[in-house]
Amino acid sequence: MRSKSRSLLMRRVALHAALTPLAIIWLFPLWMMFVFSTMSDYGIFSPDIVLWPSTGFIENFQNLQADTDFLRAMFISITVAVIYTILSVMLTSMAGWALARYHFKGRSVVIAIILGTITLPFAVVVIPQFIMVAREFKLANTWVALIVPPLFNSLGVLFMRQAFSMMPTELFDAARVEGVKEWRIFLHIALPLARPTMAALSIILFLASWNNYLWPLLINSKPGMMTAPVALGTLIGLTKVSWGGIMAGAVLLTAPILFVFIFLQRHFISGITAGAVK
Amino acid sequence: MRVHNRIAYAFLAPYLLIFATFWLWPIISSFLISFQNTRVNPWRFAPSMNWGRLVSDPAFYNALYNTLIILVIQVPVMIALATVMAVLLNSPLLKARPLYRFAFFAPVVVGEVAYAAVFRLMFSADFGIINKIIGTVGFAPVSWFDNGTAAMALVIMAVTWRWAGYNAIIILAGLQSIPGDVYEAATLDRVGKVQQFFHITLPLLKPIILFCIVLSVIGTMQLFAEPFLITNRGGPGGATETLGLLLYRQGFTSLNFGYASAIAYTIAGLAVAISLLNLFFGREAK
């Protein structure tokens, strides 16, 4: 018995000895992002190794705001992410409901479309999307251009469909017998029951919109209509730019999401694993 | 379930409308554009122009080569690392589990631009903290942005940092779906932990690991933000230029939509082919 507990202890020590350095390496860039955001440019480019935060965050943020209107860009990013999330949850729950609860002509075609597009890279549609939105609809540098084209989302539909199909049919049949209309059943019975799934999906969609880079970079490149990642991206690689300011921007982009992530980890994770594990 | 064509399509209509406008039509359109000369106004049908250029363009082969190098090195390293993370995180012996989970999963929520900025600063040749640390250990500093191989290694490290935790989350969920009594039986039969991993865990995880590989292949095929932002537009001298970056350059810097569409179709074709190949070999070996 004694040797058993000793080997258990050895295994525990080995486990932590393996994981701790890896965890430190993994946290290092995030920690340095924070540290850099509080250092003056003079400090960042000095030969010393600095691993501890200083007090220059506000000053760095002022430099960032002087380099690009970051507050405006943050406002655009937040607004776009909120509207996008609401619209996308609506679209995907309606579609998921139809696929979970009705037999209809062309059902297998719709399912094939959804499964087929999951593995299709965005690259294959980006050019015609750009031509259409920017040149034909003349919608470059607008809110619509940021919000509407990315609304198509296959994983969300699968996620919602799964939630609806796990609900007992009797629930809806009873309402039907009483003559309740289908859209009312969806709105008043099914949707409230799907709230946890919608919460998980909302978080994933918000994150996707908040971090989206390529499409906003292409379609909204005018100063004043750029999202926060795009605005920050324009500064990277400039020669006369405040790096402390860039890091302050990176922290402002990352910290709120990280904060939410700490408290809603479970939702994030169920959103990420939705496509993988059935 | 009930047969209700009208009601079902009423629920599906907004979704299908978005799909038709922003995916279906662009997929078809992209194919058609790739056969047009888009450098004249109006565009003219020129069936072999873009595809002909593609097969003889050294810039395309360079981007293809770089992308495949990243694919062959980065994806296996990351998936192996993610598996190790998941298995260790799943151990009942682990203390302070939330802390470790946070460390590995946090990069998943960090945006491309924010992390690109940090990596760029950390790996700066003269002032970067990485070279300072390398220096204190007694090695010569690495010029991460001027040396092609180092720049490639940097892109691979950055992508691995960003996505290993994402894959670990998926693999961990897979691990937790394996019933515990399988291991209990194995332990009773005095099968060692390492053997249990190779003979029970890995075979049961295989479909999930394949799923992760397919997702990673698709991601790598269109890799864009990292070489664009971290290694400064695919530098040095195109050493980290990827297919995604070439597409961006041709489409949105040179505004050569025809050629860019041919590149886009190549990316999609390769992604689908490699994914299918993976799934095929995954099934075969079972």
Image: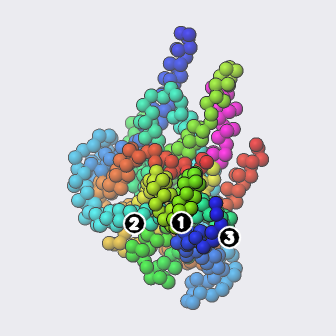
**Where is A129 relative to A256, above or below?**
below
Q: Which mark is residue A179?
A: 1
Q: Residue at x 36, y 56 (%)?
A: A253
- For the residues tagged 2 and 1, is the chain the same? yes
Magenta run includes residue B202: yes
Image location of residue B89, percent across then percent down: 51, 34
Q: Quadrant of residue A265?
A: top left
Magenta highlight range = B192-210
Left of B264 or right of it: where is A55?
left
Badge 3: chain ID:
A
Confirm whether residue B127 shows in the render: no
Residue at the disc numbered 3 = A105
Disc 3 crowd, CA 10 A, few/some/many (<14, 14-19, 20+): some
Magenta run includes residue B8: no
Give the farthest residue toward the bottom: B42
Going by the numbered disc 1, the residue's amino acid type is: Gly
Give the farthest residue toward the right: B284
Distance from Cα at disc 2 to Cα at disc 1: 34 Å
Q: Which mark is residue B69?
A: none
Q: Quadrant of residue B258?
A: bottom right
Mark with earlier residue (3, 1): 3
Residue at the disc numbered 2 = A83
Badge 2: chain ID:
A
Going by the numbered disc 3, the residue's amino acid type is: Lys
Q: Residue at x 46, y 51 (%)?
A: A196
Mark with earlier residue (2, 1): 2
Nearer to us in this view, B174 or B35: B174
Quadrant location of the N terminus of chain B?
Answer: bottom right
Badge 1: chain ID:
A
Q: Are marks 3 and 1 in contact (CB under 8 Å)?
A: no
